[in-house]
């Protein structure tokens, strides 16, 4: 990942990461999903949502209801 990008959300479920991405993109915040699920055991691992550090505060605020 680029050095100026930070992880703002992490989940075990792909659908939650997709919801997070949609929320951010609706607010015109570019983001990247990093899927770290194990290829042998797809149920093991995380999907992370990364944004540029300039958008971290806004992204965290937008995603606060997704974070349990």
Image (spheres, rainbow, N blue to C red):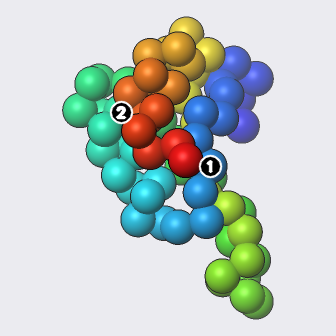
Q: Is 23 drawn above or below residue 12 in the view shown?
A: above
Q: Position of residue 55 (x, y in %)?
A: 50, 15
Could you say which quadrant of the image residue 23 lies in?
top left
Q: Look at the picture and state if 31 lies above or below 22.
A: above
| Residue 41 in the image: above or below residue 60 | below
Residue 18, located in which quarter of the rendered image? bottom left
Of residues 30 and 15, the one drawn nearer to the viewer in this rendering:
15
Q: What mark, if any, has residue 10 been given in the picture?
A: 1
Direction bottom: furthest residue: 40
Q: Report the residue marked by disc 2.
A: 24
Q: Residues within 10 Å of mark 1 (few under 14, many from 20)?
A: many
Residue 37 x %, y %? 69, 71
Tell me the residue at 72%/69% (across/down). Answer: 45
Q: Earlier in the sequence, mark 1 or mark 2?
A: 1
Locate residue 56, reporting x and y percent. 56, 18
Does residue 4 appear to the left or right of 66 in the view shown?
Answer: right
Q: Nearer the viewer, mark 1 or mark 2?
A: 1
Q: Which residue occupies 53% across, 14% down?
A: 57
Residue at 41 percent of width and 65 percent of height: 15
Dot 2: within a 10 Å radius of its alpha carbon, few (fewer than 14), some, or many (20 or more) residues?
many
SS category of the residue bearing label 1? strand
Q: Residue furthest front?
A: 68
The mark found on residue 44 in the picture is: none
For image coordinates 73% across by 88% down, the residue present is 41
Q: Nearer the viewer, residue 38 or 43?
A: 43
For the N terminus, the quadrant is: top right
Position of 13 with respect to 39 (left or right) is: left
């Amino acid at each position: 990942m680029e050095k100026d990008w930070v992880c703002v959300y992490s989940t075990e479920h792909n659908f939650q990461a997709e919801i997070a991405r949609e929320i951010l993109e609706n607010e015109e915040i570019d983001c990247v999903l990093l899927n770290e699920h194990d290829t042998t055991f797809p149920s093991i691992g995380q999907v992370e949502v990364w944004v540029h550090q300039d958008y971290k505060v806004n992204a965290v605020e937008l995603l606060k209801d997704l974070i349990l």
